[in-house]
Each structure stands twice: as C-alpha cells, then as structure tokens.
C-alpha cells in the first residue's frame, strides 16, 4: 500500500493550507464564501464545485450502518468534536455524505466504456468473490489538503490486492491508495490546531475503526467531487449482471 508515502507530514509551526485541488473541487461546496474558493477554470465545464457533464467512476461503497455502528468510529467522532479545531470541520457535510461513502478505484471512465468496464469487473469478481476490508484511523494526504480520509485495507487474496486486480482488469493504473473521504474543513487550521490534528491522527493511525464485507462495487455518475449528486449507474456483484 502507498499510504506512508502519500501521508502529509507537518513541520513545526506549519498550518493546514488548502491546496488548489481542494479550493476548486471541494471548498465551493463546503464554504462557498471562503476567499480561497476557485469558482471556475477557463476551458473546463467546472463551475462552483459542479461539472456540467457527469463524471463516471468505479467505487467501493461503504455501508452507512457498518460505519455508524462502529464503536471505534463513534469514539473517533467524539475525539474530533472535542478538539480545538472542531468548529472548522463542516459537520453537515459528514451527515450529507454518509449514504454515499465510498473509495474510488477508477475515475474518469468514459460513458462509452461503461459496459466494457462493468463486464470486466463482474468477471474479476466472479473469480474473487466478495471482499473483506478494514478501515483504519484518519489519514491526511499531500493532495486535497482540507480533506481527512479513512484508508482502506483490502484482504489479501492468494497474495494479491483484489482492488489492484480489478484495476488491472479494466486497464487503469494500480493506485495502492483507497481512501474514503469523510471530514472536510471549512476553514484552514492555524499551527496550534494543526498540531492537535496531527497528534490525533498519530493516536488513531493504526487502529482499525471499521471491518466489513464488500459484496459489490458500483459505477457512479456524479456532477461533483463530493458525490453529493451521485447516482448509481450500475451495481456489480459476483455472479450477477450490472443493475
């Protein structure tokens, strides 16, 4: 897995500053009035956090029940809400996205390629079956710096990463990163708040917060990168046809 190399390491007296990707894709949907918002990019169909044309992606959905019923998730949520930086977390976004929690396995799939991808994924799942995963404690990376994720660790199947096998089957690069975005910042953090966040992440990093089974994958269509507008184009399971 590539979590160690992708993890953000904060220097003393460094705060959380929003990078360009977060300012463009996420911040307009979280805090539209923030002065760092990037509302548009010339030549792209992107305006205030939404795309005119839907984007398609292959995702691993996480059951909201499995997530919310976890004692570890509840304990982490309490720690987050008790922190000094809690007022800068967009808690309403957590609530809006709980029914859409997912880790992206492949993005940028063209509409013309959806049927081929669905068939390839179904064939691979027929060989693999359902996939057990665990989510570990919070992760903050070097990209989308206002976002805090849960990293996904899939079970090892005959010495292989099953999600990497699925990525290979549809012809995309193996990412070795499967991240469930959950907490989103509405404001940047000062050095003191950042130090507190870094300490909390260190305390929780190696703790398993959710263990669950993934019986199917989904092809998503969405007009925003928070998946607030997401709808399921196809649900793909072993031995079944895409819905």
Image (tube, grey):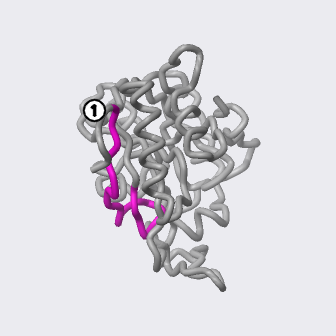
Seen at 52% across and 44% down, the residue is 105
Residue extent of the magenta highlight: 220-238
Left or right? Give the position of 41 relative to 87. right
Please tell me which residue lies in front, 60 or 40: 60
Seen at 60% across and 55% down, the residue is 144
**Residue 57: x, y in percent?**
48, 55
Where is residue 81, by image quadrant? Answer: top left
Magenta run includes residue 165: no
Please say if 76 is above or below 219: above
Please say if 20 is above or below 68: below
Asked if residue 196 can be seen in this view, the reply is: no
Residue highlighted by disc 1 = 66
Where is residue 190, by image quadrant? Answer: bottom right
Seen at 39% across and 56% down, the residue is 220
Left or right? Give the position of 31 relative to 101. right
**Residue 73: x, y in percent?**
35, 32
Tally the numbered discs: 1
Magenta run includes residue 227: yes
**Residue 173: x, y in percent?**
66, 44
Asked if residue 20 can be seen in this view, the reply is: yes
**Residue 2: x, y in percent?**
67, 33
Left or right? Give the position of 229 relative to 136. left
User: For the residue labelled by badge 1, is the local secondary structure a helix, a strand or a loop?
Assistant: helix
Prevailing secondary structure of the magenta residues: strand
Label 1 crowd bin: few (<14), some (14–19), many (20+), radius 10 Å: few
Q: Residue furthest right?
A: 11
Seen at 54% across and 14% down, the residue is 158
């Amino acid at each position: 897995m590539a979590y160690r190399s992708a993890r953000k390491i904060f220097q003393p007296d460094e705060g959380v500053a929003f990078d360009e990707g977060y300012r463009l894709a996420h911040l307009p949907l979280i805090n539209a009035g923030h002065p760092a918002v990037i509302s548009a990019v010339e030549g792209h169909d992107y305006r205030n956090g939404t795309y005119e044309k839907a984007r398609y992606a292959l995702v691993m959905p996480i059951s909201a029940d499995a997530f919310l019923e976890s004692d570890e998730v509840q304990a982490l949520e309490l720690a987050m809400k008790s922190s000094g930086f809690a007022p800068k977390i967009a808690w309403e976004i957590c609530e809006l996205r709980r029914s859409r929690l997912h880790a992206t396995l492949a993005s940028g799939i063209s509409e013309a390629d959806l049927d081929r991808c669905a068939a390839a994924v179904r064939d691979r799942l027929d060989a693999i079956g359902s996939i057990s995963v665990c989510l570990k404690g919070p992760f903050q990376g070097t990209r989308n710096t206002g976002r805090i994720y849960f990293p996904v660790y899939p079970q090892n199947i005959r010495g292989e990463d099953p999600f990497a096998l699925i990525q290979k089957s549809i012809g995309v690069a193996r990412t070795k990163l499967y991240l469930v975005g959950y907490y989103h910042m509405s404001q940047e953090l000062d050095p003191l708040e950042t130090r507190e966040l870094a300490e909390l992440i260190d305390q929780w990093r190696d703790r398993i917060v959710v263990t669950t089974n993934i019986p199917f994958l989904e092809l998503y269509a969405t007009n925003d990168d928070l998946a607030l507008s997401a709808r399921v184009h196809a649900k793909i399971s072993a031995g079944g046809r895409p819905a």
